[in-house]
Amino acid sequence: MFALIVGLQFPTASNKPVATVEFGFKPKEKRAFLEIAKQIHTAKDKRTQWIEPRLCCRIQFLERTDNHHLRMTSFKSFLFDKKADECLWVS
């Protein structure tokens, strides 16, 4: 299984996990991500590889909960031309 845990920046929390994205990835995007992840991983266990928050992506979702968790998410694209601190929540 392949999935990304997506985090957002909030005034009270840095990199708060808000979604797990499993769908919408093309094989080429998965391979590119895994190559980059090797270079920026911070911890790894059997099922999860944690990486530094350097990458941005665009996702689509059906709804957002009161706790800012996103439901029914799908991957749209990586934003390799942006730095993580340039990625902002766009509603």
Image (cartoon, helix red, strand yellow):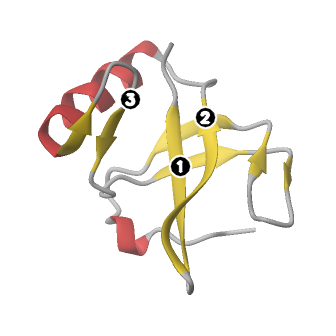
Q: Position of residue 88 (x, y in %)?
A: 54, 72
Q: Position of residue 10 (x, y in %)?
A: 57, 78
**Numbered-mark total:** 3
Asked if residue 51 lies left or right of residue 6, the reply is left
Q: CA distance from mark 3 to mark 1?
A: 13 Å
Secondary structure type for disc 2: strand
Q: Amino acid at mark 2?
A: Val
Secondary structure type for disc 1: strand
Q: CA distance from mark 2 to mark 1?
A: 7 Å
Q: Which residue is mark 2?
A: 21
Q: Are marks 2 and 3 in contact (CB under 8 Å)?
A: no
Residue at the (52%, 27%) spot, across then down? 3
Q: Amino acid at mark 3?
A: Thr
Q: Residues within 10 Å of mark 1 (few under 14, many from 20)?
A: some
Asked if residue 21 lies left or right of residue 28, the reply is right
Q: Which residue is mark 3?
A: 48
**Viewport quadrant of the C terminus:** bottom right
Residue at the (61%, 38%) spot, across then down? 20
